[in-house]
């Protein structure tokens, strides 16, 4: 079933919308959740909560990119779950990713943060658009889906070391772009 048909089913309040969403995106959402929370039960709950959120949000929300919208919902639910479990403690799984990106992202402090966030998002989007397919794939899999270097290497046919170096270089290039836009130090 096409995304537009699934969204239309949500608008009709047809419960098959949830079934179709699970059939089309369930494995993807579960894998994302598991990569983040590293626990089968929590991953299943986050996936299930995604369907509840979709049911409660559509309508009035009408996602343009349904898969990306579902992924964002799942990621947010996972981050909330991690926060609840750790209650202020640093999470060993998400901290390395955050620290990697801290090298090139702006400080979260300051009055102009929302403007900086929008500009940073535009710069990052432009940077990724200019990257080759493998570089873009590696960056998104690492920093959006939380995949480890080994998984990315298997997907791309590259070595773990090559992926680690590729992402290191990409972070450096991105940092330079952000500084050039006045968003870094």
Image: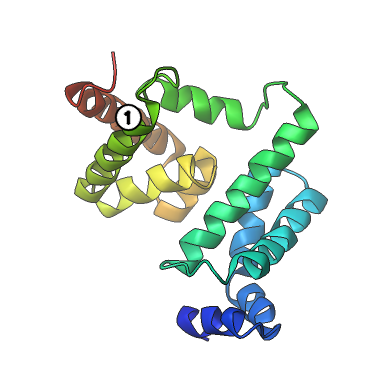
Circle 1 crowding by C-alpha within 10 Å: few under 14, some 14–19, many from 20: many
The foreground one among 125 and 116 is: 116
Q: Nearer the viewer, residue 146 or 67?
A: 67
Q: Judge by depth and name the residue closer to the eye, 133 or 73.
A: 73
Looking at the image, is 3 positioned above or below residue 66?
Answer: below
| Residue 122 x/y as whole percent | 27, 42
Q: Compared with residue 185, is residue 97 higher up or lower down, i.e. above or below? A: below
Is 151 situated above or below 50? above
**Which type of secondary structure does the marked residue at label 1 adopt?**
helix
Q: Is residue 77 left or right of residue 68?
A: right
In the rendering, at what x and y percent does residue 52 appear? Answer: 71, 65
* The C terminus: image quadrant: top left
Q: Is residue 158 visible?
A: no
Can residue 6 be seen here?
Answer: yes
Question: Residue at 54% of width from left, 42% of height from top?
Answer: 146
Image point (53%, 78%), residue name: 7
Residue 102, horizontal then vertical, whole percent: 43, 22
Q: Is residue 77 left or right of residue 116?
A: right
Spot the residue most to the right: 41
Q: Residue at x 55, y 61 (%)?
A: 70
Q: Is residue 67 above or below residue 154?
A: below
Q: Which residue is mark 1?
A: 116
Q: Position of residue 172 (x, y in %)?
A: 28, 25
The image's colour scheme reads rainbow
């Amino acid at each position: 079933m096409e995304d537009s048909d699934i969204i239309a089913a949500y608008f009709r309040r047809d419960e098959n919308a949830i079934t179709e969403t699970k059939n089309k995106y369930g494995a993807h959402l579960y894998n994302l959740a598991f990569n983040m929370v590293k626990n089968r039960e929590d991953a299943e709950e986050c996936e299930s909560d995604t369907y509840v959120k979709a049911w409660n949000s559509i309508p009035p929300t009408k996602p343009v990119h349904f898969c990306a919208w579902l992924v964002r919902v799942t990621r947010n639910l996972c981050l909330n779950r991690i926060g609840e479990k750790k209650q202020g403690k640093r999470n060993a799984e998400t901290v390395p990713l955050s620290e990697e990106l801290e090298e090139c992202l702006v400080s979260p402090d300051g009055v102009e943060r929302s403007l900086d966030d929008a500009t940073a998002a535009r710069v990052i989007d432009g940077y990724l658009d200019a990257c080759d397919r493998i570089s873009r794939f590696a960056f998104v899999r690492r920093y959006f889906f939380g995949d480890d270097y080994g998984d990315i290497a298997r997907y791309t046919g590259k070595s773990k070391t090559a992926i680690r170096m590729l992402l290191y270089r990409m972070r450096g290039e991105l940092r330079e772009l952000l500084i050039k836009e006045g968003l870094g130090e």
